[in-house]
């Protein structure tokens, strides 16, 4: 029997009765913005912009939307961090992540695929995180850098929504940063995982806002 035949509607793959469970149990509450936000752009590198490598889906429009959000943060002189996946040329730091996705081994320091896309090229003073795991926080100094910048709110852009974005969002929240997903600025190689993970992050880990709402909220802080 189809969803339509049972009278149920779907939201990001969720049945109406499933959604009611989240509502009844008190999820999807806002954490809001604090006093000082930072933008963390996850893995918008050439390899993930290329559908022939790691890209596809809605990653290209997410990059285009991030150009606008990055310009906004720069105009207001707010902290910005970018991430890259970078493995050693000799494979000495390969791990289980590269067993699950062996093509990641090609993302070395000098590889074209590992370079941040030209339209988001970091400026002086913007922090570039080199990571070997999904989360921008795991095994890096991002938490310490954000703390030094007196940041209390992390706005996340990047890819993939179901992978490194989600892992970064969960860790941002677990490090007690108010966490916001810029919905126009995150993308995935497949739309199903993108939508499902946006739903789940909204319920438990982050606030979800489009660019206009993020900008309004940040300008209101002043």
Image (cartoon, rainbow, N blue to C red):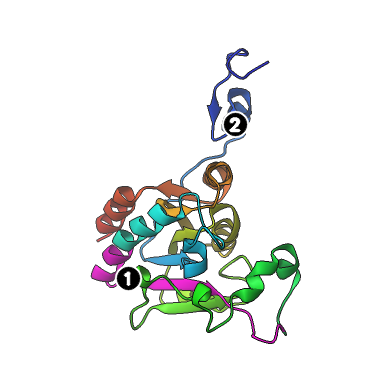
Res. 191 in view: yes
Task: Mark 2 or mark 1: name the one nearer the start of the chain.
Answer: 2
Q: Is residue 28 magenta?
A: no
Q: Nearer the viewer, residue 35 or 164?
A: 164
Residue beneath disc 1: 78
| Residue at the image position 58 percent from the left and 45 percent from the top | 193
- 96 over 200 or under it: above or below: below
Residue visible at 41% across and 76% down? Answer: 149
Percent of width and height locating residue 75: 23, 69
Say left or right for 35 vs 169.
left
Q: 10 Å neighbourhood of mark 1: few (<14), some, or many (≥20)?
A: some
User: Residue 185: percent from the left, percent from the top?
Assistant: 41, 55
SS category of the residue bearing label 1: loop
Q: Secondary structure at mark 2?
A: strand
Q: Is residue 148 visible?
A: no
> How much space separates mark 2 and mark 1, taking CA atoms?
37 Å
Of the pair 182 and 174, the residue shown nearer to us: 182
Based on the picture, tell me whether residue 89 belongs to the magenta stretch: yes
- Looking at the picture, tell me which residue is in the foreground, 117 or 43: 117
Q: Quadrant of residue 130?
A: bottom right
First to last magenta residue range? 70-91
The x and y percentages for residue 23 are 56, 31
Q: Vertically, is 117 above or below 55?
A: below
């Amino acid at each position: 029997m189809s969803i339509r035949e049972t009278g149920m509607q779907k939201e990001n793959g969720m049945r109406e009765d499933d959604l009611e469970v989240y509502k009844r149990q008190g999820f999807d509450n806002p954490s809001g913005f604090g006093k000082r936000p930072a933008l963390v752009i996850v893995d918008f590198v050439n390899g993930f912009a290329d559908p022939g490598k790691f890209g596809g889906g809605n990653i290209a429009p997410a990059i285009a939307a991030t150009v606008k959000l990055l310009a906004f943060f720069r105009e207001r002189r707010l902290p910005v961090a970018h991430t890259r996946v970078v493995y050693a040329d000799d494979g000495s730091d390969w791990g289980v992540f590269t067993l699950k996705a062996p093509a990641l081994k090609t993302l070395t320091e000098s590889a074209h695929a590992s370079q941040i896309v030209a339209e988001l090229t970091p400026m002086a003073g913007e922090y570039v995180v080199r990571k070997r795991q999904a989360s921008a926080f795991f095994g890096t100094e991002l938490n310490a850098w954000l703390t030094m910048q007196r940041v209390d709110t992390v706005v996340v852009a990047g890819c993939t929504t179901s992978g490194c974005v989600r892992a970064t969002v969960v860790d941002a929240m677990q490090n007690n940063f108010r966490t916001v997903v810029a919905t126009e600025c995150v993308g995935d190689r497949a739309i199903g995982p993108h939508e499902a993970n946006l739903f789940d992050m909204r319920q438990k880990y982050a606030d979800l806002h489009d660019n206009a709402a993020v900008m309004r909220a940040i300008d209101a802080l002043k």
